[in-house]
Amino acid sequence: MFPIAMVLGVLFHSYISAVEWVVPYLIFTMLTITFCRVRPKEFDLSPMLWIMLAVQILGSVAVFMAVRPFGLNLAQAAFICVLCPTATAAPVVTGMLGGSIPRVAAFSVLSNLSVAVLAPVLFTWIGGNGPELSFTDEFMSIAMKVAPMIVFPMLLAFALYFCAPKIHRGIARVQGVSFYLWSLSLIVVVGRAVSFVMAEPAAAIPEMIAMALIAGFLCAVQFIIGRKVGSRYGDPVSGAQGLGQKNTILAIWMSLTYLNPVSSVGPAAYIAWQNTVNSLQMYFKTKRDLKSD
């Protein structure tokens, strides 16, 4: 899907601005579908999840500070690749790899809610995209847009669980819809990112290549750290997918909206890296399963 989205984004990037308003609604819908996978009684905040959350939040700050001397755009690209919450598709991939779907789904809720709360503070701190505002004004501006898009899907999912269980179960059974929504979102956000990349001067190409390489490095590191954390609790797959598989659609949208737009190259490249990792994991798991049969 990634190369198809890139091709469509390149071909139709000049028209993307007419439909980019739909992305927040697609993200809202995808998160609602994902959160419907989690029953309140399955929302177990084990120590493993808190350790992973600490890696996500504190790691994003540490990476930003480490890369900042080499340029603000590079630092923002690295920052968003770590801060970005767990992908809506992570529970599905986790189940295919033999991990715990409820655990990753629960971490997805925790991860997304944490970003909803902390993103306004962090975006204001690192410097974003837009007019200069006071810290309070900028914080409120970002919070009013990010928090509802992430918090409301969880509230809606839990409300359906208690008030309309049949609808809740029906949504939980159609997780495949998320893939099609993800595909559409990917075309739009990649198309918008391509527009910014194509508008950049040739002198910016080395910087964008550096962003893509940093994204690849951070992708590998997060999968490795997640696997090590998960191994301590007997679930390396859930740890790896929860920490390494990111909601890149949300990351690109946040980069384009609140950071320097060129920093969206980082999460755009992360899509390719994480899909490569997932493809390799699926290949080796299938190979092992065939041998065991």
Image (spheres, helix red, strand yellow):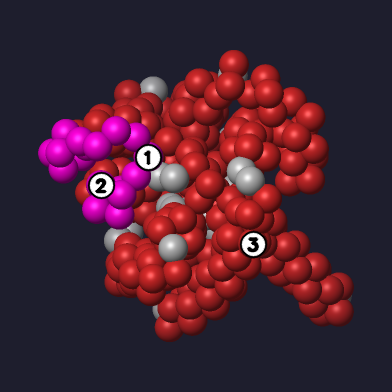
Label 2 amino acid?
Thr
Element type where label 3 sits in the image = helix
Give the quarter of the image for residue 214: bottom right
Start-end of magenta stretch: 122-139
105 lies left or right of 284:
left
Residue at left offset 41%, top offset 58%: 72
Tag 3: Cα neighbours inside 10 Å, few (<14), some, or many (≥20)? few
Q: Nearer the viewer, mark 3 or mark 2?
A: 3
Residue at left offset 64%, top offset 62%: 206
Q: Residue 259: x percent and y percent? A: 40, 45
Residue at left offset 86%, top offset 79%: 291
Rounded to the nearest angstrom, the CA distance separating label 3 from label 2 is 27 Å
Q: Residue furthest top?
A: 18
For disc 1, the marked residue is: 129
For disc 2, the marked residue is: 124
Residue 238: tell me if it is visible: no
Going from N to C along the chain, the mark reached first, 3 or 2, is 2
Numbered tag placed on residue 206 in the rendering: 3
Is 224 one of the magenta-colored residues? no
Going from N to C along the chain, the mark reached first, 1 or 2, is 2
Locate the C terminus by quadrant. Answer: bottom right
In the foreground, 138 or 289: 138
Going from N to C along the chain, the mark reached first, 1 or 3, is 1
Label 3 amino acid?
Pro
Element type where label 2 sits in the image = helix
- Quick check: 212 above or below 152? below
Q: Residue 284: x percent and y percent? A: 78, 73
Give the quarter of the image for residue 95: bottom right
122 lies left or right of 164:
left
Q: Nearer the viewer, mark 1 or mark 3?
A: 3
